[in-house]
Image: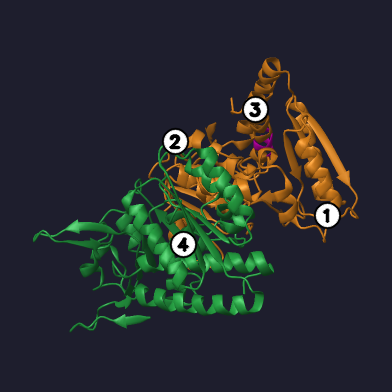
Chain colours: A green, B orange
Amino acid sequence: MSTTLSSPSSDHASLIDGKAFATGLRETIREDVRVFHDKHHVTPGLAVILVGNDPASEVYVRNKAIQTHHAGMRSFMHMLPETTTEAELLTLIKRLNTDPEIHGILVQLPLPAGLDARTVTNAILPEKDVDGLGEINAGRLASGKPGLIPCTPLGCLMLLRHELGDMKGKHAVVIGCSNLVGKPLALLLLEEGCTVSVAHIHTRNPKELAQQADILVVATGVQGLVKGDWIKPDATVIDVGITRITLDNGKTRLAGDVVFDEAVRTAGRITPVPGGVGPMTIACLLKNTLTAAQLLVTGQAE
Amino acid sequence: MSTTLSSPSSDHASLIDGKAFATGLRETIREDVRVFHDKHHVTPGLAVILVGNDPASEVYVRNKAIQTHHAGMRSFMHMLPETTTEAELLTLIKRLNTDPEIHGILVQLPLPAGLDARTVTNAILPEKDVDGLGEINAGRLASGKPGLIPCTPLGCLMLLRHELGDMKGKHAVVIGCSNLVGKPLALLLLEEGCTVSVAHIHTRNPKELAQQADILVVATGVQGLVKGDWIKPDATVIDVGITRITLDNGKTRLAGDVVFDEAVRTAGRITPVPGGVGPMTIACLLKNTLTAAQLLVTGQAE
Protein backbone atom coordinates (compact mmCIF):
# COMPACT_ATOMS: atom_id res chain seq x y z
CA MET A 1 0.00 0.00 0.00
CA SER A 2 3.11 2.22 0.04
CA THR A 3 3.97 3.90 -3.22
CA THR A 4 7.11 5.95 -3.63
CA LEU A 5 6.24 9.49 -4.68
CA SER A 6 7.16 10.19 -8.29
CA SER A 7 10.01 12.56 -7.58
CA PRO A 8 13.48 13.10 -8.96
CA SER A 9 14.95 12.67 -5.49
CA SER A 10 15.35 9.15 -4.13
CA ASP A 11 15.32 10.26 -0.50
CA HIS A 12 11.59 10.95 -0.42
CA ALA A 13 9.23 9.13 1.93
CA SER A 14 6.94 6.51 0.52
CA LEU A 15 3.31 7.49 0.64
CA ILE A 16 0.88 5.58 2.86
CA ASP A 17 -2.16 5.46 0.64
CA GLY A 18 -5.04 5.35 3.11
CA LYS A 19 -7.57 5.87 0.35
CA ALA A 20 -6.49 2.72 -1.48
CA PHE A 21 -6.20 0.79 1.79
CA ALA A 22 -9.71 1.85 2.83
CA THR A 23 -11.09 0.86 -0.58
CA GLY A 24 -9.53 -2.58 -0.23
CA LEU A 25 -10.80 -2.88 3.35
CA ARG A 26 -14.34 -2.00 2.29
CA GLU A 27 -14.18 -4.67 -0.43
CA THR A 28 -13.00 -7.25 2.10
CA ILE A 29 -15.80 -6.25 4.48
CA ARG A 30 -18.37 -6.51 1.67
CA GLU A 31 -17.20 -10.06 0.94
CA ASP A 32 -17.13 -10.96 4.66
CA VAL A 33 -20.67 -9.60 5.05
CA ARG A 34 -21.78 -11.90 2.19
CA VAL A 35 -20.10 -14.94 3.76
CA PHE A 36 -21.58 -14.06 7.18
CA HIS A 37 -25.04 -13.77 5.66
CA ASP A 38 -24.73 -17.09 3.80
CA LYS A 39 -23.70 -18.82 7.01
CA HIS A 40 -25.99 -17.21 9.58
CA HIS A 41 -28.79 -15.66 7.48
CA VAL A 42 -28.21 -12.35 9.24
CA THR A 43 -27.37 -9.04 7.59
CA PRO A 44 -25.37 -6.67 9.84
CA GLY A 45 -27.39 -3.52 10.57
CA LEU A 46 -26.09 -0.08 11.60
CA ALA A 47 -28.37 2.55 13.16
CA VAL A 48 -27.14 6.13 12.91
CA ILE A 49 -28.84 8.80 14.99
CA LEU A 50 -28.59 12.47 14.08
CA VAL A 51 -30.19 15.10 16.31
CA GLY A 52 -30.66 18.59 14.86
CA ASN A 53 -29.58 20.12 11.57
CA ASP A 54 -25.83 20.68 11.70
CA PRO A 55 -24.90 20.72 7.98
CA ALA A 56 -21.48 19.06 8.45
CA SER A 57 -23.06 16.30 10.55
CA GLU A 58 -25.70 15.76 7.85
CA VAL A 59 -22.93 15.17 5.30
CA TYR A 60 -21.10 12.76 7.62
CA VAL A 61 -24.14 10.62 8.43
CA ARG A 62 -25.16 10.50 4.76
CA ASN A 63 -21.68 9.22 3.83
CA LYS A 64 -21.82 6.65 6.59
CA ALA A 65 -25.25 5.47 5.43
CA ILE A 66 -24.18 5.19 1.77
CA GLN A 67 -20.98 3.28 2.56
CA THR A 68 -22.85 0.96 4.95
CA HIS A 69 -25.32 0.19 2.17
CA HIS A 70 -22.48 -0.34 -0.34
CA ALA A 71 -20.86 -2.86 2.00
CA GLY A 72 -24.01 -4.98 1.80
CA MET A 73 -25.19 -4.07 5.30
CA ARG A 74 -28.45 -2.54 6.39
CA SER A 75 -28.40 1.14 7.22
CA PHE A 76 -31.03 2.73 9.45
CA MET A 77 -31.09 6.51 9.73
CA HIS A 78 -32.82 8.25 12.62
CA MET A 79 -32.92 11.98 11.98
CA LEU A 80 -34.47 13.69 14.98
CA PRO A 81 -35.44 17.34 15.45
CA GLU A 82 -33.30 19.79 17.44
CA THR A 83 -36.06 19.79 20.08
CA THR A 84 -35.56 16.11 20.97
CA THR A 85 -35.27 15.61 24.73
CA GLU A 86 -32.63 13.43 26.36
CA ALA A 87 -35.39 11.11 27.60
CA GLU A 88 -36.69 10.63 24.05
CA LEU A 89 -33.19 9.95 22.76
CA LEU A 90 -32.50 7.45 25.55
CA THR A 91 -35.80 5.67 24.83
CA LEU A 92 -34.80 5.28 21.18
CA ILE A 93 -31.36 3.94 22.16
CA LYS A 94 -32.93 1.43 24.55
CA ARG A 95 -35.18 0.17 21.78
CA LEU A 96 -32.24 -0.16 19.38
CA ASN A 97 -30.21 -1.93 22.09
CA THR A 98 -32.77 -4.76 22.09
CA ASP A 99 -33.59 -4.73 18.36
CA PRO A 100 -32.12 -7.95 16.88
CA GLU A 101 -31.81 -6.35 13.41
CA ILE A 102 -29.43 -3.70 14.78
CA HIS A 103 -25.82 -4.65 15.52
CA GLY A 104 -24.26 -1.20 15.63
CA ILE A 105 -25.55 2.09 17.05
CA LEU A 106 -23.87 5.44 16.48
CA VAL A 107 -24.99 8.84 17.77
CA GLN A 108 -23.48 11.57 15.63
CA LEU A 109 -21.64 14.16 17.75
CA PRO A 110 -21.77 16.98 18.64
CA LEU A 111 -25.26 16.91 20.14
CA PRO A 112 -27.40 20.05 20.50
CA ALA A 113 -27.19 21.89 23.82
CA GLY A 114 -29.17 20.21 26.58
CA LEU A 115 -28.23 16.68 25.52
CA ASP A 116 -25.32 15.18 27.45
CA ALA A 117 -22.99 13.31 25.10
CA ARG A 118 -21.56 11.18 27.89
CA THR A 119 -24.97 10.01 29.18
CA VAL A 120 -26.16 9.30 25.65
CA THR A 121 -22.99 7.47 24.57
CA ASN A 122 -22.94 5.33 27.71
CA ALA A 123 -26.60 4.35 27.12
CA ILE A 124 -25.57 2.39 24.01
CA LEU A 125 -25.12 -1.34 24.71
CA PRO A 126 -21.30 -1.81 24.77
CA GLU A 127 -21.64 -4.69 22.30
CA LYS A 128 -23.32 -2.30 19.79
CA ASP A 129 -21.13 0.74 20.55
CA VAL A 130 -19.40 0.74 17.13
CA ASP A 131 -17.84 4.17 17.72
CA GLY A 132 -16.12 2.65 20.78
CA LEU A 133 -16.71 5.85 22.75
CA GLY A 134 -18.61 4.44 25.75
CA GLU A 135 -16.80 4.01 29.04
CA ILE A 136 -16.97 0.21 29.02
CA ASN A 137 -15.19 -0.01 25.67
CA ALA A 138 -12.70 2.64 26.85
CA GLY A 139 -12.10 0.52 29.96
CA ARG A 140 -11.61 -2.65 27.92
CA LEU A 141 -9.09 -0.85 25.74
CA ALA A 142 -7.28 0.58 28.78
CA SER A 143 -7.19 -2.91 30.34
CA GLY A 144 -5.95 -4.61 27.16
CA LYS A 145 -9.19 -6.58 26.83
CA PRO A 146 -11.13 -7.13 23.57
CA GLY A 147 -13.77 -4.52 22.80
CA LEU A 148 -14.91 -2.13 20.09
CA ILE A 149 -12.14 0.38 19.31
CA PRO A 150 -12.80 4.00 18.23
CA CYS A 151 -12.72 4.19 14.42
CA THR A 152 -9.96 6.74 13.76
CA PRO A 153 -7.38 5.15 16.13
CA LEU A 154 -8.30 1.74 14.70
CA GLY A 155 -7.69 3.10 11.20
CA CYS A 156 -4.27 4.45 12.22
CA LEU A 157 -3.38 1.11 13.81
CA MET A 158 -4.39 -0.85 10.71
CA LEU A 159 -2.23 1.38 8.49
CA LEU A 160 0.73 1.06 10.87
CA ARG A 161 0.41 -2.71 11.14
CA HIS A 162 0.27 -2.97 7.37
CA GLU A 163 3.30 -0.73 6.88
CA LEU A 164 5.48 -1.93 9.74
CA GLY A 165 4.26 -5.35 10.84
CA ASP A 166 5.68 -6.04 14.31
CA MET A 167 6.05 -2.73 16.19
CA LYS A 168 7.55 -4.15 19.40
CA GLY A 169 10.13 -1.84 20.94
CA LYS A 170 9.58 1.01 18.51
CA HIS A 171 9.22 4.43 20.10
CA ALA A 172 5.82 5.86 19.19
CA VAL A 173 5.21 9.53 19.95
CA VAL A 174 1.57 10.62 19.89
CA ILE A 175 1.03 14.37 19.74
CA GLY A 176 -2.49 15.13 20.92
CA CYS A 177 -4.27 13.64 23.88
CA SER A 178 -8.00 13.53 23.05
CA ASN A 179 -10.40 10.79 24.14
CA LEU A 180 -11.31 10.36 20.45
CA VAL A 181 -7.83 9.77 18.99
CA GLY A 182 -4.68 10.45 21.03
CA LYS A 183 -5.40 8.52 24.22
CA PRO A 184 -6.96 5.39 22.66
CA LEU A 185 -4.18 5.26 20.06
CA ALA A 186 -1.51 5.55 22.77
CA LEU A 187 -3.13 2.59 24.58
CA LEU A 188 -3.34 0.57 21.34
CA LEU A 189 0.34 1.22 20.61
CA LEU A 190 1.26 0.10 24.13
CA GLU A 191 -0.61 -3.15 23.42
CA GLU A 192 1.50 -3.49 20.26
CA GLY A 193 4.60 -3.36 22.43
CA CYS A 194 5.70 0.16 21.48
CA THR A 195 7.35 2.47 23.94
CA VAL A 196 4.79 5.29 23.93
CA SER A 197 5.14 8.99 24.66
CA VAL A 198 2.18 11.35 24.65
CA ALA A 199 2.68 15.07 24.04
CA HIS A 200 0.02 17.79 24.16
CA ILE A 201 -0.65 21.46 24.67
CA HIS A 202 1.36 21.58 27.92
CA THR A 203 4.40 19.73 26.54
CA ARG A 204 7.47 21.94 26.73
CA ASN A 205 9.64 20.24 24.12
CA PRO A 206 7.35 18.55 21.57
CA LYS A 207 9.97 18.90 18.82
CA GLU A 208 12.66 17.19 20.89
CA LEU A 209 10.27 14.36 21.76
CA ALA A 210 9.05 14.01 18.16
CA GLN A 211 12.66 13.73 16.97
CA GLN A 212 12.93 10.47 18.96
CA ALA A 213 9.92 8.88 17.28
CA ASP A 214 10.17 5.81 15.10
CA ILE A 215 6.41 6.27 14.74
CA LEU A 216 5.03 9.80 14.92
CA VAL A 217 1.27 10.28 15.14
CA VAL A 218 -0.04 13.84 15.07
CA ALA A 219 -3.66 14.51 16.04
CA THR A 220 -3.90 18.07 17.31
CA GLY A 221 -5.99 19.96 14.76
CA VAL A 222 -3.22 22.59 14.63
CA GLN A 223 -2.48 22.87 10.92
CA GLY A 224 1.23 22.81 10.08
CA LEU A 225 2.37 22.27 13.68
CA VAL A 226 4.98 19.63 12.84
CA LYS A 227 7.82 20.85 10.61
CA GLY A 228 10.34 18.77 8.70
CA ASP A 229 13.03 19.13 11.38
CA TRP A 230 10.75 17.52 13.98
CA ILE A 231 11.03 14.21 12.18
CA LYS A 232 13.63 11.50 12.72
CA PRO A 233 15.07 10.21 9.46
CA ASP A 234 13.10 7.23 8.17
CA ALA A 235 10.29 7.64 10.75
CA THR A 236 6.73 6.60 9.93
CA VAL A 237 4.44 9.64 10.14
CA ILE A 238 0.66 9.40 10.58
CA ASP A 239 -1.09 12.75 10.19
CA VAL A 240 -4.60 12.67 11.65
CA GLY A 241 -5.20 16.42 11.39
CA ILE A 242 -7.44 17.84 8.73
CA THR A 243 -8.04 21.58 8.31
CA ARG A 244 -9.45 23.49 5.34
CA ILE A 245 -7.08 26.34 4.47
CA THR A 246 -7.43 29.21 2.01
CA LEU A 247 -4.63 29.66 -0.53
CA ASP A 248 -3.30 32.95 -1.92
CA ASN A 249 -5.43 32.54 -5.03
CA GLY A 250 -8.58 32.35 -2.91
CA LYS A 251 -9.09 28.63 -3.46
CA THR A 252 -9.20 26.25 -0.52
CA ARG A 253 -7.62 22.88 0.13
CA LEU A 254 -7.30 20.42 3.00
CA ALA A 255 -4.10 20.37 5.03
CA GLY A 256 -2.82 18.27 7.91
CA ASP A 257 -1.01 18.94 11.18
CA VAL A 258 2.29 18.06 9.49
CA VAL A 259 4.02 20.30 6.90
CA PHE A 260 3.91 17.57 4.28
CA ASP A 261 6.37 19.09 1.77
CA GLU A 262 9.05 19.25 4.47
CA ALA A 263 8.25 16.00 6.26
CA VAL A 264 8.31 13.97 3.06
CA ARG A 265 12.04 14.69 2.71
CA THR A 266 12.92 13.16 6.08
CA ALA A 267 10.28 10.56 6.90
CA GLY A 268 10.45 6.99 5.68
CA ARG A 269 6.69 6.72 5.21
CA ILE A 270 3.95 9.29 5.57
CA THR A 271 0.19 9.66 5.21
CA PRO A 272 -0.94 12.51 2.97
CA VAL A 273 -3.86 14.83 3.80
CA PRO A 274 -6.32 14.24 2.23
CA GLY A 275 -6.18 10.57 1.31
CA GLY A 276 -4.37 9.24 4.38
CA VAL A 277 -6.13 8.56 7.68
CA GLY A 278 -9.40 10.25 6.66
CA PRO A 279 -10.83 7.49 4.45
CA MET A 280 -9.99 4.87 7.09
CA THR A 281 -12.50 6.21 9.64
CA ILE A 282 -15.73 5.18 7.91
CA ALA A 283 -14.13 1.93 6.68
CA CYS A 284 -13.35 1.10 10.32
CA LEU A 285 -16.92 1.95 11.31
CA LEU A 286 -18.07 -0.69 8.82
CA LYS A 287 -15.44 -3.10 10.18
CA ASN A 288 -16.69 -2.50 13.75
CA THR A 289 -20.31 -3.04 12.66
CA LEU A 290 -19.40 -6.40 11.10
CA THR A 291 -17.35 -7.33 14.20
CA ALA A 292 -20.30 -6.39 16.45
CA ALA A 293 -22.68 -8.51 14.35
CA GLN A 294 -20.30 -11.48 14.45
CA LEU A 295 -19.92 -11.20 18.23
CA LEU A 296 -23.65 -10.74 18.85
CA VAL A 297 -24.65 -13.63 16.58
CA THR A 298 -21.86 -16.17 17.10
CA GLY A 299 -20.08 -15.02 20.26
CA GLN A 300 -16.81 -14.47 18.39
CA ALA A 301 -15.30 -12.29 15.67
CA GLU A 302 -14.71 -14.39 12.54
CA MET B 1 6.55 15.59 54.07
CA SER B 2 10.06 15.78 52.55
CA THR B 3 12.90 15.43 54.99
CA THR B 4 16.48 15.84 53.91
CA LEU B 5 18.46 12.74 54.73
CA SER B 6 20.90 13.26 57.54
CA SER B 7 24.06 13.07 55.49
CA PRO B 8 27.31 15.00 55.34
CA SER B 9 26.73 15.72 51.64
CA SER B 10 24.31 18.50 50.71
CA ASP B 11 23.62 17.07 47.27
CA HIS B 12 21.44 14.28 48.54
CA ALA B 13 17.80 13.89 47.55
CA SER B 14 15.14 14.70 50.08
CA LEU B 15 13.19 11.71 51.23
CA ILE B 16 9.49 11.39 50.38
CA ASP B 17 8.17 9.92 53.59
CA GLY B 18 5.18 7.88 52.45
CA LYS B 19 4.79 6.33 55.86
CA ALA B 20 4.30 9.69 57.56
CA PHE B 21 2.07 10.91 54.73
CA ALA B 22 -0.10 7.79 54.97
CA THR B 23 -0.37 8.19 58.75
CA GLY B 24 -1.54 11.77 58.30
CA LEU B 25 -3.96 10.74 55.57
CA ARG B 26 -5.47 8.02 57.75
CA GLU B 27 -5.96 10.57 60.55
CA THR B 28 -7.70 12.94 58.15
CA ILE B 29 -9.92 10.09 56.92
CA ARG B 30 -10.80 9.12 60.49
CA GLU B 31 -11.87 12.70 61.17
CA ASP B 32 -13.81 12.92 57.88
CA VAL B 33 -15.57 9.64 58.70
CA ARG B 34 -16.66 11.14 62.04
CA VAL B 35 -17.98 14.31 60.37
CA PHE B 36 -19.74 12.26 57.69
CA HIS B 37 -21.39 10.12 60.37
CA ASP B 38 -22.50 13.15 62.38
CA LYS B 39 -24.06 14.68 59.29
CA HIS B 40 -25.64 11.65 57.61
CA HIS B 41 -25.83 9.02 60.38
CA VAL B 42 -24.05 6.57 58.11
CA THR B 43 -20.81 4.74 58.85
CA PRO B 44 -18.83 3.81 55.72
CA GLY B 45 -18.55 0.02 55.37
CA LEU B 46 -15.95 -2.01 53.46
CA ALA B 47 -16.48 -5.67 52.55
CA VAL B 48 -13.33 -7.64 51.81
CA ILE B 49 -13.66 -11.06 50.20
CA LEU B 50 -10.88 -13.63 50.42
CA VAL B 51 -11.21 -16.97 48.65
CA GLY B 52 -8.84 -19.76 49.66
CA ASN B 53 -5.89 -19.83 52.03
CA ASP B 54 -2.99 -17.98 50.40
CA PRO B 55 -0.93 -16.90 53.47
CA ALA B 56 0.22 -13.57 51.95
CA SER B 57 -3.36 -12.70 51.02
CA GLU B 58 -4.49 -13.53 54.56
CA VAL B 59 -1.97 -11.01 55.91
CA TYR B 60 -3.08 -8.34 53.42
CA VAL B 61 -6.79 -8.67 54.15
CA ARG B 62 -6.18 -8.69 57.89
CA ASN B 63 -4.21 -5.44 57.60
CA LYS B 64 -6.94 -3.90 55.49
CA ALA B 65 -9.60 -4.93 58.01
CA ILE B 66 -7.63 -3.54 60.99
CA GLN B 67 -6.91 -0.20 59.33
CA THR B 68 -10.53 0.11 58.17
CA HIS B 69 -11.65 -0.42 61.73
CA HIS B 70 -9.06 2.09 63.07
CA ALA B 71 -10.39 4.71 60.64
CA GLY B 72 -13.79 4.45 62.30
CA MET B 73 -15.37 2.53 59.43
CA ARG B 74 -17.10 -0.81 59.47
CA SER B 75 -15.11 -3.76 58.18
CA PHE B 76 -16.81 -6.92 56.94
CA MET B 77 -14.61 -9.92 56.17
CA HIS B 78 -15.85 -12.74 53.97
CA MET B 79 -13.37 -15.63 54.07
CA LEU B 80 -14.54 -18.31 51.68
CA PRO B 81 -13.14 -21.80 51.12
CA GLU B 82 -10.90 -22.67 48.15
CA THR B 83 -13.81 -24.75 46.79
CA THR B 84 -16.07 -21.70 46.30
CA THR B 85 -17.62 -21.67 42.83
CA GLU B 86 -17.75 -18.59 40.62
CA ALA B 87 -21.56 -18.67 40.85
CA GLU B 88 -21.40 -18.59 44.66
CA LEU B 89 -18.91 -15.73 44.60
CA LEU B 90 -21.04 -13.75 42.14
CA THR B 91 -24.14 -14.31 44.30
CA LEU B 92 -22.30 -12.86 47.31
CA ILE B 93 -21.12 -9.84 45.29
CA LYS B 94 -24.66 -9.20 44.03
CA ARG B 95 -25.94 -9.23 47.59
CA LEU B 96 -23.20 -6.82 48.72
CA ASN B 97 -23.91 -4.57 45.72
CA THR B 98 -27.42 -3.95 47.06
CA ASP B 99 -26.56 -3.94 50.78
CA PRO B 100 -26.96 -0.34 52.02
CA GLU B 101 -24.44 -0.90 54.85
CA ILE B 102 -21.69 -1.70 52.35
CA HIS B 103 -20.04 1.18 50.41
CA GLY B 104 -16.91 -0.57 49.22
CA ILE B 105 -16.30 -4.12 47.99
CA LEU B 106 -12.88 -5.62 47.41
CA VAL B 107 -12.04 -9.10 46.19
CA GLN B 108 -8.49 -10.02 47.18
CA LEU B 109 -6.45 -11.16 44.19
CA PRO B 110 -5.14 -13.57 43.05
CA LEU B 111 -8.17 -15.87 43.02
CA PRO B 112 -7.84 -19.68 43.08
CA ALA B 113 -7.82 -21.46 39.70
CA GLY B 114 -11.27 -21.74 38.16
CA LEU B 115 -12.42 -18.28 39.26
CA ASP B 116 -12.05 -15.60 36.58
CA ALA B 117 -10.71 -12.38 38.11
CA ARG B 118 -12.09 -10.24 35.28
CA THR B 119 -15.65 -11.62 35.59
CA VAL B 120 -15.57 -11.29 39.37
CA THR B 121 -14.09 -7.77 39.40
CA ASN B 122 -16.57 -6.53 36.80
CA ALA B 123 -19.46 -7.91 38.86
CA ILE B 124 -18.79 -5.33 41.59
CA LEU B 125 -21.03 -2.27 41.29
CA PRO B 126 -18.70 0.44 39.84
CA GLU B 127 -19.77 2.80 42.64
CA LYS B 128 -18.52 0.26 45.23
CA ASP B 129 -15.42 -0.86 43.28
CA VAL B 130 -12.93 0.68 45.74
CA ASP B 131 -9.96 -1.10 44.13
CA GLY B 132 -10.88 0.71 40.88
CA LEU B 133 -10.06 -2.40 38.86
CA GLY B 134 -13.38 -2.90 37.05
CA GLU B 135 -13.65 -1.91 33.40
CA ILE B 136 -16.09 0.93 34.02
CA ASN B 137 -13.73 2.66 36.44
CA ALA B 138 -10.82 1.97 34.03
CA GLY B 139 -12.89 3.57 31.25
CA ARG B 140 -13.75 6.60 33.39
CA LEU B 141 -10.07 7.06 34.17
CA ALA B 142 -9.09 6.64 30.50
CA SER B 143 -11.77 9.18 29.52
CA GLY B 144 -10.75 11.70 32.18
CA LYS B 145 -14.07 11.30 34.00
CA PRO B 146 -14.49 10.99 37.78
CA GLY B 147 -14.42 7.45 39.13
CA LEU B 148 -12.70 5.27 41.70
CA ILE B 149 -8.96 5.13 41.03
CA PRO B 150 -6.78 2.07 41.78
CA CYS B 151 -5.16 2.50 45.20
CA THR B 152 -1.44 2.31 44.40
CA PRO B 153 -1.51 4.78 41.47
CA LEU B 154 -3.71 7.08 43.59
CA GLY B 155 -1.12 6.88 46.38
CA CYS B 156 1.68 7.79 43.95
CA LEU B 157 -0.36 10.70 42.62
CA MET B 158 -1.08 12.04 46.10
CA LEU B 159 2.63 11.96 47.01
CA LEU B 160 3.57 13.68 43.74
CA ARG B 161 0.92 16.38 44.14
CA HIS B 162 2.09 17.02 47.67
CA GLU B 163 5.76 17.21 46.66
CA LEU B 164 5.43 19.10 43.38
CA GLY B 165 2.06 20.85 43.28
CA ASP B 166 1.32 21.76 39.67
CA MET B 167 2.89 19.16 37.36
CA LYS B 168 1.80 20.73 34.05
CA GLY B 169 4.42 20.31 31.34
CA LYS B 170 6.72 18.10 33.39
CA HIS B 171 7.98 14.99 31.61
CA ALA B 172 6.85 11.92 33.53
CA VAL B 173 8.40 8.60 32.57
CA VAL B 174 6.59 5.52 33.86
CA ILE B 175 8.57 2.28 33.70
CA GLY B 176 6.15 -0.62 33.85
CA CYS B 177 2.88 -0.97 32.04
CA SER B 178 0.56 -3.07 34.22
CA ASN B 179 -3.21 -2.58 34.53
CA LEU B 180 -2.68 -2.28 38.28
CA VAL B 181 -0.08 0.52 38.38
CA GLY B 182 1.72 1.65 35.21
CA LYS B 183 -1.18 2.27 32.84
CA PRO B 184 -3.58 3.95 35.31
CA LEU B 185 -0.75 6.12 36.64
CA ALA B 186 0.23 7.15 33.10
CA LEU B 187 -3.39 8.21 32.48
CA LEU B 188 -3.54 10.11 35.80
CA LEU B 189 -0.32 11.97 34.98
CA LEU B 190 -1.71 12.91 31.55
CA GLU B 191 -4.73 14.38 33.37
CA GLU B 192 -2.30 16.39 35.50
CA GLY B 193 -0.89 17.89 32.30
CA CYS B 194 2.39 15.96 32.28
CA THR B 195 4.02 14.82 29.08
CA VAL B 196 3.97 11.07 29.68
CA SER B 197 6.23 8.31 28.36
CA VAL B 198 5.64 4.66 29.18
CA ALA B 199 8.50 2.16 29.02
CA HIS B 200 8.29 -1.59 29.55
CA ILE B 201 9.89 -4.94 28.83
CA HIS B 202 10.12 -4.24 25.07
CA THR B 203 11.60 -0.75 25.43
CA ARG B 204 15.00 -0.61 23.77
CA ASN B 205 16.45 2.41 25.59
CA PRO B 206 14.80 2.68 29.02
CA LYS B 207 17.85 4.39 30.49
CA GLU B 208 17.89 7.09 27.79
CA LEU B 209 14.17 7.69 28.31
CA ALA B 210 14.49 7.73 32.11
CA GLN B 211 17.25 10.32 31.87
CA GLN B 212 14.69 12.75 30.39
CA ALA B 213 12.27 12.36 33.29
CA ASP B 214 11.38 15.21 35.62
CA ILE B 215 9.21 12.59 37.33
CA LEU B 216 10.36 8.97 37.20
CA VAL B 217 7.98 6.24 38.37
CA VAL B 218 9.29 2.69 38.45
CA ALA B 219 6.83 -0.18 38.83
CA THR B 220 8.37 -3.27 37.29
CA GLY B 221 9.06 -5.66 40.14
CA VAL B 222 12.64 -5.98 38.85
CA GLN B 223 14.72 -5.23 41.92
CA GLY B 224 17.57 -2.79 41.28
CA LEU B 225 16.65 -2.17 37.62
CA VAL B 226 17.15 1.60 37.77
CA LYS B 227 20.71 2.71 38.54
CA GLY B 228 21.90 6.15 39.59
CA ASP B 229 22.94 7.15 36.08
CA TRP B 230 19.39 6.61 34.79
CA ILE B 231 18.24 9.61 36.79
CA LYS B 232 18.17 13.23 35.67
CA PRO B 233 19.62 15.59 38.28
CA ASP B 234 16.91 16.87 40.62
CA ALA B 235 14.27 14.46 39.29
CA THR B 236 11.47 13.20 41.54
CA VAL B 237 11.67 9.41 41.80
CA ILE B 238 8.77 7.20 42.89
CA ASP B 239 9.75 3.57 43.45
CA VAL B 240 6.71 1.27 43.48
CA GLY B 241 8.70 -1.97 43.40
CA ILE B 242 9.06 -4.07 46.52
CA THR B 243 11.10 -7.29 46.61
CA ARG B 244 12.47 -9.23 49.59
CA ILE B 245 16.17 -9.86 49.11
CA THR B 246 18.63 -11.97 51.08
CA LEU B 247 21.79 -10.26 52.28
CA ASP B 248 25.26 -11.80 52.58
CA ASN B 249 24.72 -12.35 56.30
CA GLY B 250 21.62 -14.43 55.58
CA LYS B 251 19.20 -11.77 56.79
CA THR B 252 16.53 -10.40 54.47
CA ARG B 253 15.33 -6.90 53.73
CA LEU B 254 12.92 -5.20 51.34
CA ALA B 255 14.32 -3.45 48.26
CA GLY B 256 12.81 -1.45 45.42
CA ASP B 257 13.23 -1.32 41.65
CA VAL B 258 15.62 1.64 42.06
CA VAL B 259 19.16 1.32 43.47
CA PHE B 260 18.43 3.73 46.28
CA ASP B 261 22.00 4.42 47.42
CA GLU B 262 22.94 5.55 43.90
CA ALA B 263 19.70 7.33 43.03
CA VAL B 264 19.70 9.39 46.21
CA ARG B 265 22.88 11.18 44.99
CA THR B 266 21.23 12.44 41.78
CA ALA B 267 17.51 12.72 42.40
CA GLY B 268 15.88 15.78 43.94
CA ARG B 269 13.32 13.74 45.87
CA ILE B 270 12.87 10.01 46.22
CA THR B 271 10.64 7.47 47.95
CA PRO B 272 12.45 4.86 50.02
CA VAL B 273 11.56 1.16 50.08
CA PRO B 274 10.11 0.32 52.52
CA GLY B 275 8.26 3.40 53.82
CA GLY B 276 7.54 5.10 50.48
CA VAL B 277 4.64 4.09 48.25
CA GLY B 278 3.80 0.91 50.18
CA PRO B 279 1.98 2.49 53.14
CA MET B 280 -0.06 4.66 50.76
CA THR B 281 -1.93 1.74 49.20
CA ILE B 282 -4.13 0.80 52.17
CA ALA B 283 -4.57 4.47 53.13
CA CYS B 284 -5.92 5.09 49.61
CA LEU B 285 -8.25 2.10 49.95
CA LEU B 286 -9.72 3.80 53.03
CA LYS B 287 -9.91 7.09 51.11
CA ASN B 288 -11.76 5.35 48.26
CA THR B 289 -14.17 3.70 50.70
CA LEU B 290 -15.00 7.08 52.24
CA THR B 291 -15.36 8.63 48.76
CA ALA B 292 -17.67 5.78 47.69
CA ALA B 293 -19.81 6.25 50.80
CA GLN B 294 -20.03 10.01 50.21
CA LEU B 295 -21.03 9.49 46.58
CA LEU B 296 -23.55 6.75 47.38
CA VAL B 297 -25.17 8.71 50.22
CA THR B 298 -25.02 12.33 49.03
CA GLY B 299 -24.27 12.07 45.29
CA GLN B 300 -20.97 13.91 45.68
CA ALA B 301 -17.55 13.54 47.28
CA GLU B 302 -17.25 15.94 50.22
Q: Image point 43% across, 72% down: which residue?
A: A160
Give the residue pinned by disc 2. A114
Q: CA distance from mark 1 to mark 4?
A: 35 Å
SS state under label 4: helix
- Residue A124, x across and y down, in percent: 57, 50
A262 lies above or below B134 = below
Q: Earlier in the sequence, mark 4 or mark 2?
A: 2
Q: Residues within 10 Å of mark 4 (few under 14, many from 20)?
A: many
**Residue name at image x 40 percent, y 47 percent:** A110
Residue A79 appears in view: yes
Q: Secondary structure at mark 3?
A: helix
- Residue bearing the label numbered 1: B86
**Could you tell me how far apart the alpha carbons at marks 3 and 2 are, in whole angstroms?**
27 Å
Q: Are labels 3 and 2 on one chain?
A: no
Q: Specify the quadrant that holds the N terminus of chain B.
A: top right
Tell me which segment is drawn in magenta.
B282-286
Amino acid of disc 4: Cys
Instruction: Decide: is A175 above or below B137.
Output: below
Type of amino acid at the residue the image marks with label 3: Gln
Cα separation, mark 2 vs mark 1, equals 43 Å
Amino acid at the residue labelled 1? Glu
Please give the chain letter of the residue carrying mark 1: B
Q: Which SS type dominates the magenta stretch?
A: helix
Mark nearest the camera among 3 and 2 is 2
**Marks 4 and 3 belong to one chain:** no
In the rendered view, does B134 fall on the left or right side of B165?
right
Label ID, residue B151: none
Residue to which mark 3 is pinned: B294
Drawn side of residue B55 relative to residue A258, left or right: right
